Image: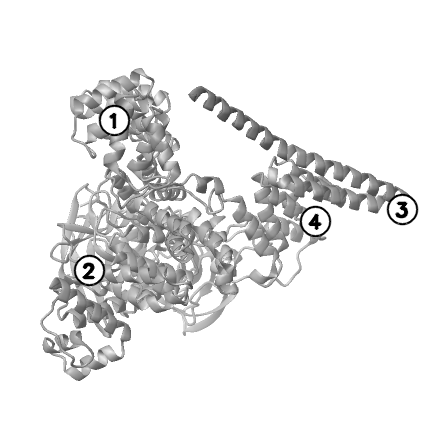
Amino acid sequence: MGDLPKSFYRLCLQAIISMSLTDCVSRSSTGNVAFLDAPDAPVSNCPLRVEYSCFQSSVVHVQVLVSFDTGSTSAVFHKYWTCEPGHTRTRVVTVSFPDWLVYRPDWIIRGSDWVLSCLLRGWIGLGEFTGVDRFPGASVTVPLDIHSPLSRPFKQHQLCAKWDTYLLWRVSRHDMPKCAEENEVASLLSTLYASTGERYGIIKTLQPFRNEVLEGQRIKSIYYPWFAVSLWVWLEKPCTNSLCGLLLHIDTENSYATPSMFLTDAGNIHVQVHGDAGHSSAFLSSFNVPLHQWCRISLEILGRVAQISIACMEGQQKFVNTAEHIFGNNIMLDDTHGYFVIGGGKFVHGIEGYYGPATYYRIQGLPTDQAEIHLPPVISNVNITGWFQSCENFKSELFLSPTDHSLTAKRLSDSCLDTYTELLLNHSAVNSTEQCMFFETNPYRRQVAQLTKLLSQKYGKVNASAVGRILYALVLRKISTAHSLEVVTRMMPFLLHSGCLGDNRALHLSSVLYSSGFGVKRQPYKAWLLSLLAAQKDWRLALLRLGHMHHVGDLEVTPDRDLSYAYYINIARQTSVDQKNPSPQQTFVELIRLNDEETLKAQTNENDDLFHWLKLQARSGVAEAEQAMGRMLFWGQQGVSPDIQTAIKHYERGATKLNDPVSMYDYAIVLLTGQGVPKNVQRAVTFLKKAIELGSVPAITALGWYYEQYEKDYEKAVHLWEEADAKGHPDAAMNLGVFHSQGLYPGQPADQFMAYKYYLKSAQRGHLNGGIELADIWIHGIPDQVTRRPADAVLWVKWASEQNGYLGTVLRNGLNACFKGDWIMSLIYYLSAAESGFEAAQFNVAYLCELNSGSLDPALVTRCMLRYYNMSIQAQDPAPYALIRMGDLFYGEQALGRKEVSDAAEMYKEAALKNEPQGWYNLGLLVQNGESLPFGVLSELNLLHLHVTDQQMLLSTLYQRCRETNSTDAYLPCTLALFSAHLQSLQLHQDTAIKLIATVSAAVGTLSFVFGLIKWRTTPLHTSQTSASSQTQEEEEEES
């Protein structure tokens, strides 16, 4: 057994002192001495009554002894007097404790020291210099409580400080030592996390304490730990693997460290710790974790003794179980070494359920209030348990059995309310009166029951998920035929029933509506609940919404990048898999804003003239048209539905008939992977080599992949990838990163830092998996090489997640509905993507509210525009139009109830810096209206010098820059505004005659300019029409 740490001996010493030396009376053969009113802590000029007697001539000593954390000791007070034999006497001694031991530092007390212990002691000795340990006579010792320097009171000085002393103190007081505000309790999770049971979790790291005392205690307790951890969990299903992660501690060697807690497939808790000898130890709890209940799992370890407990709540009933275990070896814990994971990780799956608040007590045990079981407020407010109980009751009453949610039609009857009710009554133990009351008081449930009855009559047997899917489809059909959002209010109960029956689309849409307040009262906690339910079932858009919500925060949620990452990484990796398996349910994600007329004109479909024109061009041998047709049909771009088989025909025609290197590469890839065509490796290699000869860089990377996968020739593969990487291909950099990470690079060991550099290069070139792997390194870090960058990691997985094909389908549905004139369904689809954080969808929701303001409540329109334009401008590259509209909302009092000139100017400035003429124009209007632009705005526009010289010159400069943006549509209004500014300037500085001459001259100039502008704008059109007519005439002559 190794040596015990010094902290242990110190604790033992203090315990011994407190037990054996606190007696204030001491007697011996030489006399006795006692402290009648010893203080509890050091105080200034403390009167101390000392009772003493002696049997021979002696000396009585009173001393204050202080020991420091460095190990040194010092006597800060010592008084003595003679004692003659006789009766017992009492003497009052004024004990003068030094100010630095009693008070906080100030302008006189230069510094207060940290003190380990303070002893007030007295003894009887033979002389003045006889110590307590040199004479076995009477002695007494009292330990005093010591407070930290900044916990002590200020001293009320009786004299004023000198002027120079006071001034010096005022200058240097901020340099005085102050305790850093730190808490020994670390919150690993303060909210809820929906776990799908996959290898995703919340990654947290802890840093050393900034406070020297706390950090010293932490370091000393590494080999004799005293800590505790508390975690709330809610199990949806038992663990389907041998172990599922609850709370894990992973060290820098990717090994499990102290503490690590798992859930076994039998429901027990597996606790694992790491010993100081390099060995791990573990034990199992004697109790199981129940399903469908919130349970608090607590683990406390002191030295070798571990105590684990569980406290569960089901309704008003509570139960607690506790188990204790003593480890055979010393335990080691360095909580700054490695990282913690709540849920699943790289090496283990998480639970299928929900994680609640998790707290880690770093250098202390569980608080005393842990004996009381109370649900955290966030758990009570979201109320997952209440939803499941209500939903299970509904399904059991609808389908008779909660375990087999299916229904078979038996017969028809008119009893009670309808045939379904009669069927239910004949097969239920509940009496008929209760059943009739159930459906009478729940008209929405009655209609769901009627739908279920009709389906059972038609198909014989239906399950809950089938009813949920059909119910969701009926709700969307009802909304699409409505002309106002009032229908949403009536349809919301059916959406909730559909979600209860297992349709995750309904859960997500309900969450979006409750979050936005469209058609229903805004209920953030209910929206959060529904998103958690859908995310736990791995619904992609719900994962996106929760990732976005925890990234930017909400009124009820503070931002948590680590939690946001846990959601985003899930859908990001799904996106990588989805792109390798295209399906009709996926559509290429396109960033299309509804005010972008050029992009809207480029949209097409299978019946559109543009599509048929491209098809004709492809048949005519235009390689670019073949490429466009194949791309649109394979990925479902520009409004075309995915058709992989037809896309491959275009790839093949471009490769075989047109010798197009792009088509050769695309066709070779589908031949290599067998997507939509039988796999033909040799033919694929032939096309790849031809494409390389024609200069195709992607073909070089693909050929390297062939050598790696089929020939196992890593040297040839690496050679090709390095060639492609030098030419800027993202896939090549990604493959090289994987080889360095896994130790497959010929002649070199695994090198995570080299892999990191290639991942970074691949991500910056736009590679999806490169961004995911880069984020994985930034969320974990590489010890001594790459620090954790969770903020940047979240941005990369968010970017990867927003390329998911299922999100693309929602966006395409919204655009198609807009083209059809169905603005309500377009709004619904875009709203689903907007609440998930997609910037273009947020813009489109606000834009649709703006366009359809006549059909919506004015307050809703303003709230919609303010919310979603504001969301839109938080993106890295916001649309100038959104900035302009936000500026208008800030300047108009109808949005916020007050005019925010500075915020409006900031928005207009951001638009102006994007070369948006409306931004410059609106800034000019602010100046023209007498508003003062903030100095920061003028500084960024390089116009600060004009503000302090001439307002008219500032106004003219703003309109001049508006005209210089090279926007054809803005040229005329900006010029007229500039002309008006010049007129105002002349009217302010010239006399009446000059004003008249200037006005006439300006009028003539303006008319000349307008006629010139009209001529300039019409001439190119005439010329182009003439050229087109000439070209048409020449083509007709050639044909004849």
Q: Which residue is mark 3?
A: 992
Q: Nearer the viewer, residue 786 or 977?
A: 977
Q: Which mark is residue 652?
A: 1
Q: Earlier in the sequence, mark 3 or mark 1?
A: 1
Circle 2 — which element?
helix
Q: CA distance from mark 2 to mark 3?
A: 84 Å
* Cβ–Cβ under 8 Å for marks 3 and 1: no
Mark 4: secondary structure = helix
Residue 155 at least partly seen: no
Q: Element under label 1?
A: helix
Name the residue tied to disc 4.
Answer: 927
In percent of width and height, residue 533 lies at 27, 59
Q: Is residue 8 above or below residue 152?
A: above
Give residue 337's position: percent from left, percent from top.
Answer: 30, 43
Residue bearing mark 2: 465
Separation (CA) of disc 2 from disc 4: 61 Å
| Residue neighbourhood size for the residue with mark 2, other residues' Cα within 10 Å, grouped as few (<14), some (14–19), many (≥20) | some
Could you tell whether 904 is left or right of 590 in the image?
A: right
Type of residue at label 2?
A: Ser
Of callouts 4 and 3, the N-terminal one:
4
